[in-house]
Image (tube, rainbow, N blue to C red):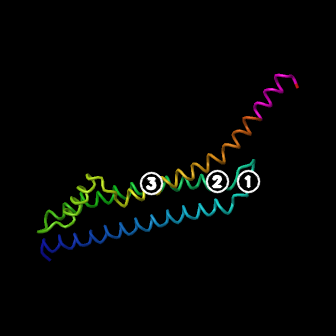
Amino acid sequence: MDRDELILREYESYCVQKENFIDRNFRTNKFYMTAIVVLIFALIYTSNIVFLNKISATLVFALLGVSVSALWWMNVDSYNTLIKIKYSNVIEKIEEKLPVKPFTDEYIGIDESRKNKVFMFSDIQKLIAAGAALFFFAVCVSEITPLVIAVFNKIINIALKAKCGI
């Protein structure tokens, strides 16, 4: 096997690995989407369940929703960074030794479209994750507010009783 054939085989192997990595990214995104949908249904169907000290199942699932959304956002960022590294640091360097550079050309095209503020798939994923996080955060606030008001009222009642000497 000569040097050029070895380079081509390494290039093909790495391209397959990159595609597998992108497929794993899509599977991961499906997982997060499913988790968010399941948490929304859990919010709906467990709205009447209350745990210790007036903590509702809704609050618990909303906190989980905020956490899952934040993890999804970070995961999208991580995958994007790793995919860019695979393109620019590895595939492009291997392509320097090849007569054509399809991934380098593709990356240049993606980079140019990015400069024109075209919405990329990862931006949509982040938008969905942010929207879900805001939704779950709003549910958390609506669930925590009555608890905070109740605690505040108890503190005021205790302070008034102490002041009045009762």
Q: Using a 10 Å C-alpha cutoff, classify the residue at mark 3 as few (fewer than 14 neighbours), some (14 to 19) or many (20 or more).
A: many
- x, y percent for residue 130: 47, 52
Q: Using a 10 Å C-alpha cutoff, classify the residue at mark 1 as few (fewer than 14 neighbours), some (14 to 19) or many (20 or more).
A: few
- Which image quarter: residue 2? bottom left
Q: Residue at x 64, y 59 (%)?
A: 43
Q: Which residue is mark 1?
A: 51
| Residue in the foreground of this view, choosing between 163 and 97 | 163
- Label whose residue precedes the other's in the sequence (3 or 2): 2
Is disc 3 in contact with disc 2, using a CB cutoff of under 8 Å?
Answer: no
Q: Please tell me whether residue 29 belongs to the stretch shown in magenta.
A: no
Q: Residue at x 31, y 67 (%)?
A: 18
Residues rendered magenta in the picture: 154-165
Q: Which residue is mark 3?
A: 73
- x, y percent for residue 151: 73, 38
Position of residue 160 in the picture relative to residue 140 (left or right): right
- Which image quarter: residue 36? bottom right
Element type at mark 3:
helix
Element type at mark 1:
loop
What is the chief secondary structure element of the magenta stretch? helix
Position of residue 77 in the picture relative to residue 52 (left or right): left
- Number of the label disc, if any, that sits on residue 60: 2
